[in-house]
Image: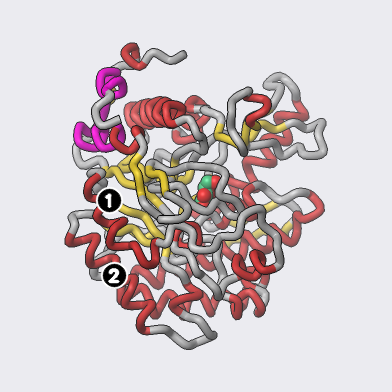
Amino acid sequence: MINFSKLPEVTFPKGFLWGAATAAQQIEGDNFNNDWYRAEKEGKFRDPCGKACNSFELYREDIALLKELGHQAYRFSVEWSRIEPREGEFDAAATEHYVDQCRRLVEAGIQPWVTLHHFANPLWFSDLGEWHKRENISHFLRFSDYIVPKLAPYVAGWTPINEYNLHGGRPPHPDQHLKMANYKINLLFADAAVYDLIKQHSTAPVGSPLAYVPAEPVRAHDEFDRLMTGMVDWTSNGFYLHAMRTGELVFPFVDGGFFPELKGRCDFWAVNIYTRHMVDSRKADAYGKRYLHAKEAMIDQEFWFDEMSPDAVLGNLLRLTDKPVYITENGCSCDDDLYRIRYMALHYAAFRNAIDLGVDLRGVFHWSLMDNWEWGTYAPRLGLVEVDRKTFQRTPKPSAWIYKQIIANNGFSGEVLFSQEKC
Ligand code: BGC
């Protein structure tokens, strides 16, 4: 057991930003016009998304909740399929909804950070072949050109495309390699192009979140595990960092080249970081598993939860010393909220160490504000706040109150973590 009172005092630089993140499809509910809804109708999910957290209706309450919990920033996504329900046709009411959300956040003293694409495609875009075709990027740019200027007066940070580097949650399996390589590379070009577009309308910083999954060999001494680890790291993290830094695209089994339009197209490294991949070159599933399963961990947990690996997180943040960094997602899935509090403490301590070692880390967005629809299931619970699935009532967990204290103190000590106030 970790004894929090023995953790050192952990404080963050003045102005460090604390907040939480969500995604439209996971919280809004009733998104009937995107590819997730189509998959839901085809019975592909354990749990249908349905009304999710009903946040499209309850967004004002969510803003009040963020305020009560002391958050300084809120990262959320706009739902493309609501704003552009048919190709080239924009919906004024849906647009006003997101403008109002931004306006109210600013009034509440909370910085809006906006994602333009978080895994969900409008049906018409999906029917056109979505990101599999390079020419479809123009549709995304038209949409962005419409919505960005409307939100720009309020937005404090842009995180345009969420996790294009890890399609499907993990690096491509060899069978899928070329298809997925193409998909990721198209998203990389979309990301670079939307960066230029946003810059025409907004002075707020821009950075698309990388699903930054540290890869580690199962056997550190084994040359095949190390080789495969390098491959996994390159196809998920390295290709993107290299392209953004140099303009050179290098991806296994794909003709590379220099593309000046890719170089430098982010103002900060946006990092979604949870845990590591353990890479085993002798398994068909060599790309590694991200999660410890409940059975192995021997806890009473229906689904999976994130293993804690703050050392891997720290080691990988040290690769990002050439630009400011924001942690745009970090959190864990667990029913045991004390586990979440420990996870937060250990990861924030790792973030603080990264700052001491030269990383210009400027803020953290906890994933997630509330328990939500985890892409096919409601079983994993990553929220600071519990949501009643019938009434949609929001109830902050102890971790939400602890987080509030961390934000208020811009750091924590063992005492803060031991506090049972409001728990
Ligand atoms: C995604 C979120 C997801 C979270 C937890 C991230 O990769 O951006 O949408 O809920 O991981 O699995």
Q: Which mark is residue 65?
A: 1
* The C terminus lies in quadrant: top left
Question: 30 or 268, which is in the foreground?
Answer: 30
Residue ID at (20%, 36%): 408
Coordinates of residue 336 in the picture (x, y in percent): 48, 30
Residue ID at (55%, 49%): 378
**Residue that carries the numbered disc 2 in the rendered image:** 152
The span picked out in magenta is 402-419
Does the stretch in magenta take in 410?
yes
Coordinates of residue 386 in the picture (x, y in percent): 41, 44
Question: 141 or 113, which is in the foreground?
Answer: 113
Whether residue 265 is visible here, answered yes or no, is no
418 vs 130, left or right, is left
Quadrant in the picture for residue 300: top right
Whether residue 66 is visible here, answered yes or no, is yes
Q: Is residue 46 above or below residue 332?
A: below
